[in-house]
Image: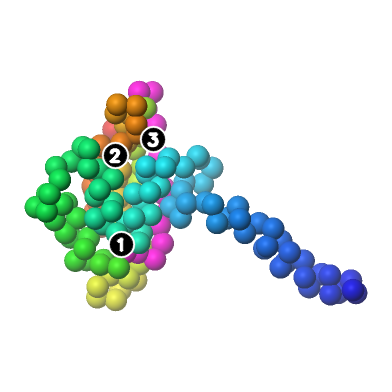
Amino acid sequence: MSILSRLALAPLAVALLTAPAFADEPPCALNGLAPLPVLEKAKAAILAGDYSGFYRETENVFPQGEAPEKAAIGPLQTGSPKGFDSCSTILRRTDPGGMVQEITLYTGLNKSGRSDEVAAFYLVTAPLNGETKIIVFSYNGQIAELLGELR
């Protein structure tokens, strides 16, 4: 094999060797920090438009049933029924007692077909009965509104 052929194959070899590492990275993880499974599962559900799945992640803390769920996630189901195209966790704050706060931005097509929409999600976890649980969540189209919720 000529040196030119080897050079042409080098990018393919690098892509094949590094693909598993990228495949294991959660889609909304914050670069450089270890992912928190409960948050990554919830953020992936939001990204995919599985808002009921996201809400189920809060089932031990928030009221269950059709009415509370509809009140909590109905605007998402109406505004972005198919989820989002991308997400980026932009902030994580960890307190000494174990509470973790994150803000994640989602972008993608909404029901009107606009792709410049941004939704900001604020998720808070805390240790409860030996497990990490989502204890607070909110979302807004304006990140400034969510920044005021940081503790």
Residue occupying the point 40% across, 57% down: 87
Residue 126 figure quarter? top left
Sequence-wise first label, 1 or 3: 1
Separation (CA) of disc 2 from disc 1: 18 Å
The x and y percentages for residue 137 are 25, 44
Q: Which residue is mark 3?
A: 93
In the image, taking residue 126 as reference, residue 3 lies left or right, namely: right
In the depicted structure, whether residue 72 falls above or below residue 136:
below
The residue type indicated by label 1 comes to: Gly
What residue is drawn where x is 14% and y is 42%? Answer: 63
Residue wearing tag 2: 134
Residue at 18% of width from left, 60% of height from top? 75
Check disc 1 and report the residue beneath it. Answer: 49
Front position among marks 1 and 3? 1
Q: Is residue 90 magenta?
A: yes
Q: Given the image, on which type of amino acid does mark 2 rest? A: Ile
What stretch of residues is rendered in magenta?
83-97
Q: Nearer the viewer, residue 67 or 111?
A: 67
Circle 2/circle 3 CB separation < 8 Å: no
Q: CA distance from mark 2 to mark 3?
A: 14 Å
Predominant secondary structure, magenta span: strand
Q: Secondary structure at mark 3?
A: strand
Q: Is residue 3 left or right of residue 44?
A: right
Residue 25, percent across and down? Answer: 52, 51
